[in-house]
Image: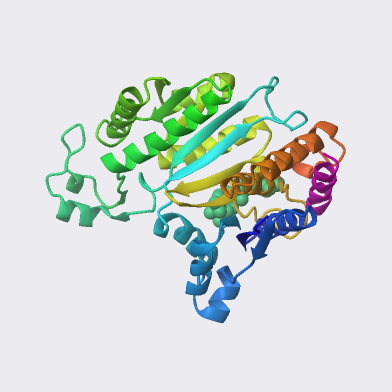
Amino acid sequence: MTPRSVVALGGEGIGPEVIDATCELMIKAGMPVEIMTPPHGEPAIKSHGHGMPDTTKRACQSADGVLFGAAGRSATSAVVGWLRWEMGTYASVRPVKHYAGAASPLAHPEGIDYVIVRELSEGLYPGREGELADLARALPDLRDKFGRRVGEYGAGRFAAKVVTQGGVERAARFACELARGRKARGGQGKLTCITKSNVMPQSDGLFQHVVADVASREYPDLAHEHFYVDDGARRLIRFPRQMDVVLTMNLYGDILSDLGAETAGGLGMAPSGCYREGWAYFESVHGSAPDIAGRGIANPTGALLSAAMMLDHMKLAAEAERLEAAVARVYRDGKTLTADQGGKASTTAFAHAVLEAYRNS
Ligand code: NAD
């Protein structure tokens, strides 16, 4: 089998710890991958004068798969900035799935299995912020719902939220295709849209209406519903089994995917894949976790399951399924779990247990 080229970028904090453990597993398991680790982040600033050198960008663009650890301070935010904003990845797919044995705070997490699609390219990200006085000068007639002009607020700052028809359409189609694929494998065939359109009828309202339009016109075979984000957050906790594919705006998706991850078993377990047409990269949902970095205790499950998503993307579906099943088995056995799961295993001990389960499957 032709080996797939993979670029692994550890990032910072626990990023390199979980990515190293994941890469070691892929190699030792005999998967057909060739892994490159080009310079990025702080070391690249010293050697190349930039956190994301051109050679590293080219390697990512031409690789079959890109696996990222976690961003932290400015050096690695240049990496995630490039992977998201410059590469134009617009759909962050974040599975929320409970594995038996994982430490969910819910009494009955069994059967939680849905996907959050976070629109990744618009909304309040990447920050467009500034002084209110500048906004008042540029838009002197901009008023709030109660007729007050921005210039009347006093000194302060603003952030601009952007929603475009085209941006929502492509995210909606992506989420609907995902729901259709899940339906073909026995899923509910349902799209849940989450916004705050009651308070922001222009921006969030556009998101809600474009999603409803795409879903009803182009995907009549799917069920479609909408909730305001406060109610949506509650439902993800109270009725997680009613969810299938949840499509939401950038900031809400950022927050709700941590919430969903926690209900399923913990933030350290949550994977993601960030897609655009013809290219994608994969990363855990968690960040650099400076409070536990360097201690070898981070849970590598998010990185391992992100690698499984990457293997699937690289048309190594059998390896992807086998890796996910191996992770599930280690949770089911419950003997080699990391501290966040109530165990004592190190990052590498957990990954070795997954490797053993992979080999024995
Ligand atoms: P975080 O996700 O890094 O950590 C939140 C909490 O979860 C911490 O207590 C941490 O110890 C725990 N945790 C996270 N991953 C874990 C794992 N694999 N195993 C065990 N415990 C784990 O969020 P934060 O502390 O708010 O942010 C730290 C830094 O990460 C910030 O600089 C932030 O901007 C960045 N960040 C980056 C990304 C990304 O790269 N995509 C995502 C979120 C946060």
Identify which residue is drawn at 32% across, 37% down. 169
How are the colours assigned in the image?
rainbow
Q: Is residue 90 above or below residue 175?
A: below
Is residue 40 in view from this perspective?
yes
Residue sitting farthest toward the front: 1
Identify which residue is drawn at 19% across, 32% down. 146
Identify which residue is drawn at 29% across, 28% down. 209
What residue span does the magenta drawing correspond to?
346-361
Reply yes or no: does residue 269 show up in magenta.
no
Q: Quadrant of residue 216?
A: top left
Q: Quadrant of the C terminus?
A: top right
Which one is in front, 85 or 276? 276
Is residue 164 in view from this perspective?
no
Picture mark count: 0
Residue sitting farthest toward the left: 141
Q: Quadrant of the N terminus?
A: bottom right
Q: Position of residue 305 (x, y in %)?
A: 66, 44
Q: Position of residue 229 (x, y in %)?
A: 43, 29
Identify which residue is drawn at 53% across, 67% down. 59
Most common SS among magenta residues:
helix
Q: Quadrant of residue 72?
A: bottom right
Q: Position of residue 271 (x, y in %)?
A: 61, 43
Which one is in front, 190 or 204? 190
Q: Position of residue 196 (x, y in %)?
A: 36, 30
